[in-house]
Image (cartoon, helix red, strand yellow):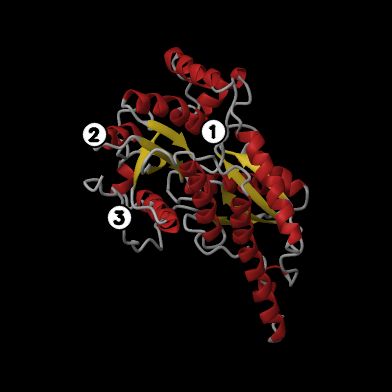
Amino acid sequence: MSDLAPTSPTASPALLPYRHGCPADADPFAPRLPGSDPADDGGHGVDGGVGILLMAYGGPASLDEVPAYYTDIRGGRPPSQELLDELLERYEAIGGRSPLAEVTERQRRALEGELARRGLPVPVHVGYKHSPPFVAETVGRMADEGVRRILALALAPHFSTMTACSYCQRVDAARRTLQERDGGPAVRYAMVADWHAEPAFIEALADVTRTALATLSGDGRPWVVFSAHSLPERIVGLGDPYPDLLRETARLVAETLGLSGWSFAFQSAARTGDAWLGPDLSTELERLAAAGVRSVVVSSVGFVASNLELLYDIDIEARARAAELGMRLVRAAALDDHPRLVAALADIVERALRRGRRSSTARASSGAA
């Protein structure tokens, strides 16, 4: 297979800083929890009124919830019956529901436990973009429970203005509603906008990919295709780094595993009038089959939890296409509550909190009021 070259760059591009529209109270690419400095809140540090907000896309817990979920994704516009029927059919094929909420709750509990083990007993909450509890609901509940400083972390490792910024703006709108409409207490927040190269995250991806490769040990030299959700191609013209960040993650995992045969593809593009980022996973499978590849591991670097895009788009659609092409396809397991993923999230949170404590200690030692 010497004629097959990776479709991803081998050199790491200069990826920081990114243009963004996140209205957080702190730099979303080097978060220090706002209010953790004595100059901000009278010297309370990070020990009082702090909460972690994990944010995810959301999903229907039953077929009955699919219409409302799909309508919310479409900005309040109900889908046509044809589109709704297609989505219902997909959810029926994976058991009639999304497993995302259960998985995210496991991630939440595991992160809260890991933080407590590290001496950081901070409450961890969950809010979703398109299903209950929505981000705004969770921010309101956190405020009711006395949280005044939020570290918001999207369970989407790769920054894009269409992902990270949309989560950040939801947090901002929620806290403004609390302050302006309800006269509630001021809530400040920092946003973790990107963690695509977090070492423990790379280790987790390498682990599940290695395990999947082991199942194909008798199939010659399996090829690895790293994948992630596609977005409209127009984001590239706006300077959005999303494609570069994904390929950077793929490169880091490939280097960790010492892979010689790997490439990157996008998946799950929506059927709109826009062009979407490619190559598409199906197109990449066709390329590989034409070059003589007979076994493939698909390892998603863009999703950290089991969802429709993995359970249907890869396990059913992509696997069927691979079979038509005479290929065997194995998907690397979703990270879900993998210990190294939990460690990655805890590392991110701990840096933000410890940075604040160091800042507070330094100011106190120098006699700052």
Q: Amino acid at mark 1?
A: Asn
Q: Quadrant of residue 186?
A: bottom right
Q: Residues within 10 Å of mark 3 (few under 14, many from 20)?
A: some
Please indicate whether residue 230 sits to the left or right of residue 57 in the image.
left
How far apart marks 2 and 3 lie (CA) works out to 22 Å
How far apart marks 2 and 1 lie (CA) works out to 30 Å
**N-terminal of the two: label 3 or label 1?**
3
Q: Amino acid at mark 2?
A: Ala
Give me the disc on residue 9: 3
**N-terminal of the two: label 2 or label 1?**
2
Please indicate whether residue 48 sits to the left or right of residue 252 in the image.
right
Residue in front for this viewpoint, 323 or 82: 323
The image shows residue 351, relative to residue 166, as above or below, that is: below
Q: Are marks 3 and 1 in contact (CB under 8 Å)?
A: no
Identify the residue position indicated by label 2 in the image.
Answer: 290
Would residue 133 be visible to someone looking at this image? no
Identify the residue position indicated by label 1 in the image.
Answer: 307
Secondary structure, mark 1, is: loop
Q: Amino acid at mark 3?
A: Pro
Query: Could you tell me residue 335's position as x and y percent?
Result: 56, 44
**N-terminal of the two: label 2 or label 3?**
3
Q: Residues within 10 Å of mark 2 (few under 14, many from 20)?
A: few
